[in-house]
Image (spheres, rainbow, N blue to C red):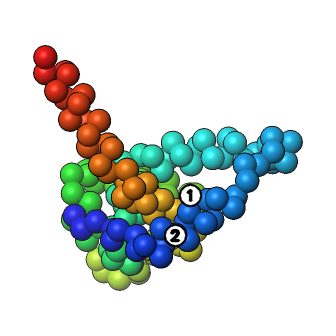
Amino acid sequence: MPKLAAPTPAQIKKAKAILACAPPPQTEDIDPRLEPLVNDLIGRVADKWTVIVMEVLTENGEMRFTRLAEKVTGISQKMLTKTVRVMERDGLLVRTVHPVVPPHVDYKLTPLGLSLSAAFCGVWIWAAENIEQVEKSRRVFDKNAAK
């Protein structure tokens, strides 16, 4: 499966500026509904299939169910159906049923889904900045584990 393009130096700089300027919220200023929502969304989005479906739809735009299933390698039809239903419920994608024979269904990320997908750019930034350290740590760990 094709991967999202790595962020440009300008995107990295912008993301760092945004992160540097964002002070941590004060506990008393946080809407009490926010923490449960964030925890729920992290649990959902951290799901392997949700992330991959978002990535495929970001790269390809609107897709029929069968084409989406082809691009999300290794997923069962049942799991793909469950994943897109949960994403639709959360407002991350829109499902369009075309009244033709045989019927077909298209899926497309909503602006909300696209903005969440863009948030994963931060993982690319972190990985680009830390790849050497992570690879070194893995080598040391694997060497020690082999003993």
The three-letter amino acid code for the residue at tag 1 is Arg
Residue at left offset 49%, top offset 47%: 44
User: Percent position (x, y) of residue 25?
Assistant: 76, 49
Disc 2 from disc 1: Cα separation? 34 Å
User: Percent position (x, y) of residue 19?
Assistant: 62, 59
Badge 1 local density, few (<14 within 10 Å), some, or many (20+)?
few
Let me know if residue 1 appears in the view.
Answer: yes
- Tag nearer the camera, 2 or 1: 2
Residue 13 tag number: 2
Question: 123 or 97: which is nearer to us?
Answer: 123
Residue 89 tag number: 1
User: Percent position (x, y) of residue 123?
Assistant: 43, 55
Q: Secondary structure at mark 1?
A: helix
Badge 2 local density, few (<14 within 10 Å), some, or many (20+)?
few
Q: Quadrant of the N terminus?
A: bottom left
Q: Quadrant of residue 65?
A: bottom left
The three-letter amino acid code for the residue at tag 2 is Lys
Q: Quadrant of the C terminus?
A: top left
Q: Secondary structure at mark 2?
A: helix
Identify whether 74 is placed above or below 40: below
Let me know if residue 105 appears in the view.
Answer: no
User: Percent position (x, y) of residue 7?
Assistant: 40, 70
